[in-house]
Image: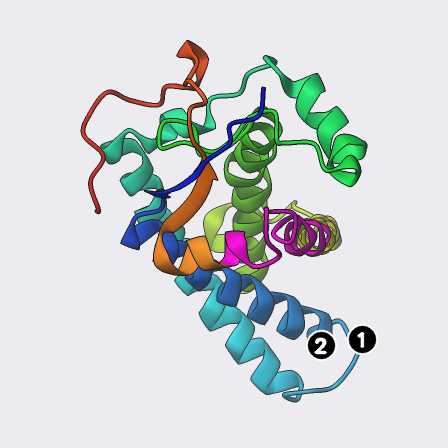
Amino acid sequence: MTPSKMVNIYLYTRYERFWHWLQTAFILLLLVTGFEITGLFTLFGFETAVEIHNFVGLAWLIAFAFFVFWVFTTGEWKQYIPTSKKIVTVVRYYAYGIFRGEPHPVPKRRDAKHNPLQRLVYLTLAAVLLPVQMITGFLYWGYNSWPAWGLDGWSLSLIATIHLAGAFALLSFLIVHVYMITTGHTITAHTRAMITGWEEVAEGTPVEEWEKAHERKYCDT
């Protein structure tokens, strides 16, 4: 049964919102400069694009280390624990139910900001794709130091290929992500929530045991 009332809850802390928009800017700059470096177009000029790409890449690596620290010290890592519960229902919703105006089968709550499908996607992104992209980017940046690092036998073309494939994967995620933020009860609901921290959700939906991220009082950190 669909709850009849919508209520505002404080869902995203200042740091979460800051990290979201900072990472968005980093990814966009890296994609634009990275594709320019490969010769797809000219915008900043090759040398400037390389300088921007290197600087932003290193800044992203440092910022990501702070994010990992924040996730584990606040207990928010529990928001990313994967589960198979209701994942088929969520996939069906995005593939079919959303176009029929059906309510979301797993509404957002403080204890469960991400539905099962989002947990899998964000965990894969944060634990696999981003680290691989950062490591390959760092290796590419430090190519001239490979002999000193004992990496003489490594293939630069392989590192470059993996890095480029990761860039296209990030671009694909970004396109899907932009589409998904328009699927709230209003077209700007999710964007507004990531700016203000407050999101309107259905009232009266109980939080199931698997959705509980932590027991501590939710605070703005």
Relative placement, left or right, of 145 versus 44 is left
Residue 121 position within the rendered picture, expressed as x and y whole percent measured from the top left: 61, 34
- Residue at the spot of label 2: 36
Residue 146 in view of the camera: no
Q: Is residue 24 above or below residue 217?
A: below
Q: Secondary structure at mark 1?
A: loop
Alpha-carbon neighbours of circle 2 within 10 Å: few (<14), some, or many (≥20)?
some
Q: Is residue 97 above or below residue 172?
A: above
For badge 1, the amino acid type reads Leu
Q: Does 150 lie within the magenta span?
A: no
Badges 2 and 1: C-beta atoms under 8 Å apart?
yes
Q: Does 185 lie within the magenta span?
A: yes
Residue 98 position within the rendered picture, expressed as x and y whole percent measured from the top left: 73, 37
Residue name at image x 76 percent, y 25 percent: 92
For badge 2, the amino acid type reads Glu
Query: Which quarter of the rendering shows the N terminus?
Result: top right
Q: Nearer the viewer, residue 187 or 166?
A: 187
Q: Is residue 61 above or below residue 104?
A: below
Q: Main secondary structure of the magenta part?
A: helix
Residue name at image x 71 percent, y 18 percent: 88
Using the rendered view, name the quadrant where residue 28 is placed: bottom right
The CA distance from mark 2 to mark 1 is: 5 Å
Q: Which residues are magenta?
A: 172-191
Relative placement, left or right, of 219 versus 88 is left
Most extreme residue toward the front is 4
Relative placement, left or right, of 131 versus 217 is right
Q: Is residue 69 above or below residue 79?
A: below
